[in-house]
Amino acid sequence: MKAIIIAAGVGSRLGSLTKNLPKALIDVNGKSILEHQIEIFHKLGIKDIVIVTGHKKEKFRLKDVKYVHNPKYLNVEQADSLMSARKEIVGDVLVSFGDIIFDELILNQLLQFDGELILSTDQKWEKSYQIRTENSPKFSDFVAVKNDQIIKFFKNSEEFLGKCDIVEFIGLMKLSEIGSKKIIQKYEYLEKNHKDKFHYASSFKKAKIIDVLEELRLNNMEIKIQNVNGKWCEIDTKQDLEIAKKMFK
């Protein structure tokens, strides 16, 4: 099992904290976000770790990991950064966003679930936004589910309110060997052939992971969700950082 952490973003909403430092290296109680993730990976026996860098790549100095730099990071989005490391997407692969912290329970739940593509999701997302007042769920990643079937991957939490169950994708997913092959095959086809708007993205090069997931769903890839029970948080703002420090103290 390999882990790929997407850590190329600028993290501009954190203001001065990320002016000269990648968001993934922000300190949370004495350890960076990356170090929190890597510690959990190591606990569960995952030692093969790849980090996709972008903003301030020279600041990444962690040892015993592999770095892949995305030189286009300022003009692209998550999907392009992940595919900068496409040569590493082989066999069983974990993919994690570089701005989240999660506990061992969450990762353990994901590892025990089998399928081509498994996503960690949160059923209790509404509670978190009651304290994340500087964030709006309209811009987070969601999955609409009805009768245990995924209806759509989408950005605006209000789109399906009252129509079906909604869970939030937390930024952690697992690919099987078949899943890894399928996601690369579909991405490379789109890379050559897709023009104009791409789902919620203004263009294919601006695609986020949620846009790629929706495309895979429409092409009948086997995608499953694993609703998590542990602790996790996303760090987009200074308020989020304070919440993370309390949650993982």
Image (cartoon, rainbow, N blue to C red):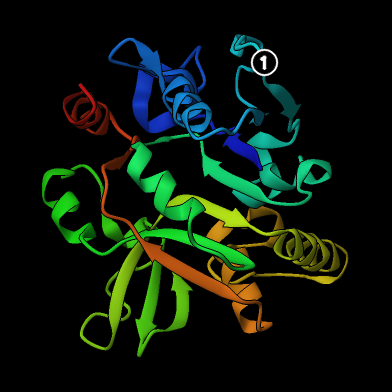
- Residue drawn at (25%, 47%) of the image: 135
Q: Nearer the viewer, residue 130 or 228?
A: 228
Q: Could you tell me residue 68's position as x and y percent?
A: 75, 29
- Residue drawn at (70%, 64%) of the image: 179
Residue 97, placed above or below residue 237: below
Residue 30 visible somewhere in the drawing: yes
Q: Nearer the viewer, residue 38 or 99?
A: 38
Secondary structure found at label 1: loop
Residue 86, placed above or below residue 240: below
For badge 1, the amino acid type reads: Asp
Q: Residues within 10 Å of mark 1 (few under 14, many from 20)?
A: few
**Residue at the spot of label 1:** 64
The quadrant of the image that shows the C terminus is top left
- Asked whether, in this view, residue 73 is left or right of residue 211, the answer is right
Which of the 4 quarters of the picture holds residue 151? bottom left
Residue 53 visible somewhere in the drawing: no
Determine the residue located farthest toward the right in the rendered image. Answer: 192
